[in-house]
Amino acid sequence: MSEINNSMTQSSLNTATTSAYEKWRLLKDAIMRRAVVAGGLSVIFAIVVIFFYLLYVVYPLFLSANAESAAQYAIPEESAGKTLFLAIEEQNEVAARFTDTGKVIFFEVKTGKTLAQKTVLLPENVAISSVALGSPVNEGAIIYGLSNGQAVIVKQQYKVTFNADKRVITPSLKYPLGETPLVIDESGAALEKIAFKVGDGSTTIVAKTADKVRITSFEKEQSLFGDDASLTRTDSILNMPAGNITNILVDKEDRNLFLVSDDGSLSFIDMSKKNAPEIKQHLNVVDAGQKITSVSFLTGDLSLMIGDSSGLVAQWSLVKDALNKPALQRIRVFKVSDKAVISINTEQRRKGFVTVDANGEMGIYHSTAERELIKEKISVSAPLSTILSPRANALLFQNADGKIHFWKVDNEHPEVSIKSMWQKVWYESYPKPAYIWQSSSASNDFEPKYSLTPLVFGTLKAAFYAMLVAIPLSLMGAIYTAYFMSPKMRIYAKPSIEIMGALPTVILGFLAGLWLAPFIEEHLSGLFALLVVVPLGVMLFAFGLQFLPENVCQKIPEGWDAAMLIPVILISGWFAFSISVPLETVLFHGTLRDWFKRELGIGYDQRNALVVGIAMGFAVVPTIFSIAEDAIFSVPKHLTVGSLALGATPWQTMIRVVLLTASPGIFSAIMIGFGRAVGETMIVLMATGNTPVMDLSVFQGLRTLAANIAVEMPEAEVDSTHYRVLFLAALVLFVFTFVFNTLAEVVRQRLREKYSSL
Amino acid sequence: MIKLWFKSGSPWIWLNAAAVSTCLIMVIGVLGLVAVRGVGHFWASPIVSMSYQEDDGAVKNIIGEHVDTTVTPALMAKSTGFKMADNEDVLIQYLMKTGNRDLTGSDFRWIQERHIKSQAEPADLIVVERREWGNFYGQLMAVKENDKVVATGDQMWATLQERLQAALVLHEKITHLEKKELGAINYALEQLRLKQRGLELKNSWNSETAKDFADKKAAYDVDYKHYQAQLVDLHQQIRRDSLVAKTESGAELVIPLSKIVDVYQPNNMSLFAKIKHYVVKLGEFLSEDPREANTEGGIFPAIFGTIMMVIMMSIIVTPFGVIAAVYLREYAKQGFTTRLIRIAVNNLAGVPSIVYGVFGLGFFVYILGGNIDALFFPESAPAPVFGTPGLLWASITLALLTLPVVIVSTEEGLARVPKAIREGSLALGATKIETLWRTVLPMASPAMMTGLILAVARAAGEVAPLMLVGVVKLAPTLPLDGNYPFLHLDRKFMHLGFHIYDVGFQSPNVEAARPLVYATSLLLVLVIIGLNLAAILIRNHLREKYRALEG
């Protein structure tokens, strides 16, 4: 239509004398046309942007990691000895090479230029027989086990200073337990394997000589005066054969000790009592014929990653067994390679780890998400020493070709996978796999748990109970209002119910949380009585009405039944509440709540799904009512009149003709109502305890996606995994409601066409 | 008989009618509940003084307001641990507001009716509304000036009123000085600091500007010292007077008048005085700042914030909504695409509001705001200006949220304008835009108005997205004040709906704050229902008008 109009106006104007004014009018028309089109399209564009922006934020969650070689250079100061291992500091600027001659070479990561060369103070004529990083790893402490039964602890320190806004990192070495070597084995036997834990108060060293495993613990005691500190030493020897031990691991609480043997077995020793360590478990952890080739703690030291010669990496964690005692249990396995896994480097802040196999192939994994993030060949053969930087964004290793390689790793969100969000996950120190949402934790040791399942469950549970309240009320109300109510009353009744929909949900939530929840807690039995007594009361009233004298009956206006019923419902409601208490005491010997708890074991939260159901049902009623009422009301009159003329009662006409015709409209009303219930935030936030539990009980709380976003979004760090997962929750809500609403809208449009054709 | 009755289907019709009645009862019930509880808050209820036997047998005096009553059947009371005599059927308990939180630790206590030995409503009991520690209930003993008793007995009450008025005037002066004058100086100093940092960043900070800035700073310092001196003086004056009151336990408490908002004797008030008191309290509620972590005082900043946000939102949403509707109805070629767009727009109204909040936070606050900060406000880094939730972003987010409402409503209005009017205008030689501007849009303007009113009603009641994009529980300054540039779009603000959530659920003293939340809810409900009724009226009026035109 508009096209024709335009051409008409233009042609009429063109024939007229085109004065400047006419030109201006035309120009104005053209400009405004463009402006309106641009404006209109931009608004519609803005709407599309919402969806794509949410997607854009969520998308990085599912990207794999990326690793690329950033530099490679000759081994710095190669003459200073063979590399025992490498270390790198947090900023990825300075690295260190520890050699078998007791030298430490600090060099620039990017170029390999030597920054400083230090020598660890070792006794004369003594060889380094073993070396190990201390636990916890982020302390940067190293122990050297010596061939004379002594040990030396050094600590790498990186001091950051700023010189004219430029960061300068100065490396140095420190001796936390003094420069004199500690005598571990008095007989002077070489310490073949060693491990230790450093701490402010205590240090524990576990060392293996040719035939013994020794546990030596130093307790630092600050004297009252001055800075003098004295060391109290406790020694003990483990009562087990030590010959074939290849690895020693001490956790950072120095409570658990793990010994790995070359026959593929693992011993778990409780050494919380330093003078009497206790062997708790001894078990085989690899398949027959395979060997343990690498082992490492996952950050937090709650589980061990054990790599074997067949290319498998298994996560063994201390899980409480039937007797509530911690026992090692294999909770998941990764197939990493076909070759032996020669090194496992775990991240210091997340539950991720990097494996390298004998072929020089590197893989980055995340344990709980069970994700393989990247697999890349980094070297032609097995690299000598691999180290992951503290922030897990760089990899440094010495290759067989005699060069040091520096790789940059980009691995932002390894902890989320489809599996970790939607399926049961076996978290460390949990007795079995579970769905858990626990986005924040006090420390890095306990990983955040991002299972969306309890939230979706909570959302659907809340929506389900809300619909349970709303559907009967609103549909029955719609049927009556559209078909049986007198037009005069309808004018008032319909807007009154619809105005409920305009009530701010924060007020409904407030009433639900602070008024309804305590009320229901106190009058639970009354609520159940209400469900029985009110319909009965209404029926009785209606039935009794028949027996009124004829002339009274005729005076009752038709279609005002609903108004007449208001006092009936109020009275029967009051009756229900007043009989409920005596009934409760007789039937349940106390309150109904206690009875549920006692007899059925159902706990009662004050803010529970029942409260949410009623409050949110209240909020959804007007939505469903309004649409369903429209659909029923606009059923063509000739259909109903025809049915009535054929002798059907009004109720039969309603059920068989009207409802059937209007059913798509009713369906779409329910859909839209459901969409509203799913996305409602404030009512759920205020009327439930917001505990993300998965419990179908109507007396338990829940946490919905929307409420979860409202609670956690303000605290989520921008672009962190948590932030993106919350965006994902928003996206899920968006897509969910959009699909439901579109479906409803399409159904409704179809219905409109059908009506017009009838 | 019954069988026949059931066969006729009439019981089912009655049940359906019952559903409508239930819905109506629920609506009226909710509105009534909010109204009754909200209205009652400002009424000066009588104070009861009773002698009460505690569980340990000691008889004590209790002074307070009656708040709530519960009736528990004997059996249930027993199961919760009360000792019940055989002849007692029920346990009646009263919730009393006894105030004096500074002395007893809590504002409320439950008492059992059966343990009340006697009760009375002495006329000389006073309620002291304090700036801290909530209400005080007790008996006035004396009025003091600098620790010297100046009035007791009969003239005590008159003296107290007189001196309290003086103290309130002083308090007014102090807040004015602190907030307006000192606030302006602090703001100016902060601006100066930012300017200096800006110049430093541009490398144009030199000795000349340094001297200039130092001069300005010195001038402000002089002003500051001047006001400071005034303040010290005022503080000294206000601290002069105090009152001495006896608590329920007989202890005497000195309350400085500087800490008092109001003193009244509810038991001694006539009905007229109570009505006056009610009106005054209502006025204070609407016009004053909140006190005591929002649990007392007024809600003015929340009202102001809500209005500001709604106005900003209207300014944004109206043009865009109208343009989009005009495009869809008048310019776009009708077909599959427009149908698709309409469905999309319709459905956006059904997208959960929290999703808009998430979008607003991510896109507007962090991306747009962050970039604006980087481009225009490098001097205030690392403190964000627009890169943090604030009024502007809240308004835009809510504008986006209410856009579908305006589009749908405006489109409906455009569709109702009869074709003949458009064609007539075009036939007379008007261009399309002239036709739209002069005839169609004015005729559709009530529809736009309806849309806007509905949008405003929705925005005023929406809380979830605002929690993410700019609302705070306590904003130190209003978004509009006397400091250039007067309207501070970057500031956070308070909002009625969030106030309800915050005070009702996050405040440390929920019981004491509850009446206030009801009152706030009532205000919000009234505003929103008023707006909705206005929209309905306009719509009905509009329909009538076009019916006349079409006829």
Image (tube, coloured by chain):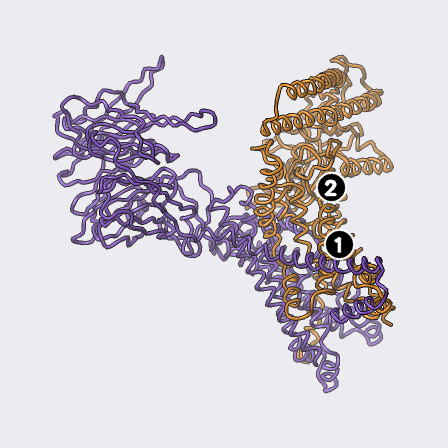
Q: Quadrant of the N terminus of chain B?
A: bottom right
1 vs 2, front mark: 1
**Do tags 1 and 2 sit on the same chain?**
yes
Residue type, mark 2 in image: Ile
x, y (%) of residue A546?
Answer: 76, 75
Residue type, mark 1 in image: Leu
Q: Which chain is purple?
A: A
Instruction: Describe the element under mark 2 as helix, strand or loop.
Output: helix
Q: Is residue A350 above or below residue B350?
A: above
Label 1 marks a residue whose chain is B
x, y (%) of residue A126?
Answer: 15, 25
Residue farthest along the bottom direction in this orientation:
A646
Badge 1 density bin: few <14, some 14–19, many ≥20, Cα 10 Å: many
x, y (%) of residue B140?
Answer: 76, 23
Tell me where residue B270 sits by quadrant. Answer: top right
Q: A97 and A449: which one is in front?
A: A97
x, y (%) of residue A687?
Answer: 59, 50
Instruction: Describe the element under mark 1 as helix, strand or loop.
Output: helix
Q: Which chain is orange?
A: B
Instruction: Tell whether A646 sits left or right of A719.
Output: right
Instruction: Tell whether A119 sits left or right of A240.
Output: right
- The residue positioned 62% from the left and 27% from the top of the image is B199
Which disc is residue B452 wearing?
Answer: 1
Q: A51 and B280: which one is in front?
A: A51
Sequence-earlier tag: 1 or 2: 2
Q: Quadrant of the C terminus of chain B?
A: bottom right
**Distance from Cα at disc 1 to Cα at disc 2:** 19 Å
Which disc is residue B303 wearing?
Answer: 2
* Mark 1 vs 2: CB contact within 8 A: no
Badge 2 density bin: few <14, some 14–19, many ≥20, Cα 10 Å: many
